[in-house]
Image: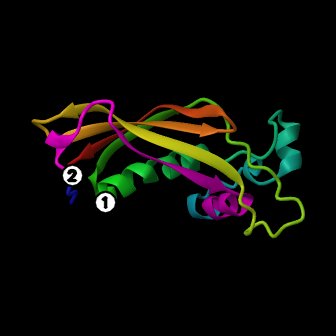
Amino acid sequence: MSNIDVATLEKGQEIGSSTLHVNRADLVRYAGASGDFNPIHWNERFATEVGLPGVIAHGMFTMGAAVTLVEDWVGDPGAVIDYQSRFTKPVIVEDPAGTNPSDAQGTALDVTGVIGALDLEAGTARVDLTVMAGGEKVLVKAQALVRL
């Protein structure tokens, strides 16, 4: 359970920010866990042949990575009772070119969270996330509802 008192929060208050790095090895691990082996997530040639700029991260991987900011802030992943987003831009994950793929730092995902709404009666806060990669928003209306 969270130690955060909803009454001490204010709309517009920042909960924090983080930079996460996504590399191709992360995508392969996620493919195995999710069962999504679509080659656009690991094969450069295939991805470009279907019109993408390169290998892209799974949308659900991106969404899941972004919400870790909220989970870390609240201290309990189970306190996140709703989470939704819209995907706007793909997250391009560059080829590590000559390095061990597991060692490659990868593409940076910059995540910032602010309190978007409070419900004192229900004891909940809506956290609005801004998720950027390569200077562009990759998720919009990324909102997590947290019971405090």
**Residue 17 on the magenta span:** yes
Q: Nearer the viewer, residue 37 or 45?
A: 45
In this view, 86 is above or below 3: above
Q: Is residue 21 magenta?
A: yes
Q: Position of residue 97 (x, y in %)?
A: 88, 59
**118 or 144: nearer the viewer:** 118
Determine whether 22 is above or below 113 in the image. below
Please state the horizontal and vertical placement of residue 91, each as a whole percent of the image: 68, 42
Res. 4 mark = 2
Q: Which residue does the image show at 20% across and 49% down from the upper left? A: 148
Please tell me which residue is depicted at 70% across the width and 57% down the height of the picture: 23
Identity, as a three-letter code, of the amino acid under mark 1: Gly
Q: Is residue 64 left or right of residue 75?
A: right
State the mark number for residue 75: 1
Query: Which sits in the foreground, 59 or 13?
Result: 13
- Determine whether label 2 and label 1 are within 8 Å by CB: yes
Q: Residue at x 82, y 37 (%)?
A: 53
Looking at the rendered structure, the secondary structure element under dot 2 is loop
Residue extent of the magenta highlight: 4-31
Q: Amino acid at mark 2?
A: Ile
Residue 139 lies in what quarter of the image? Answer: top right
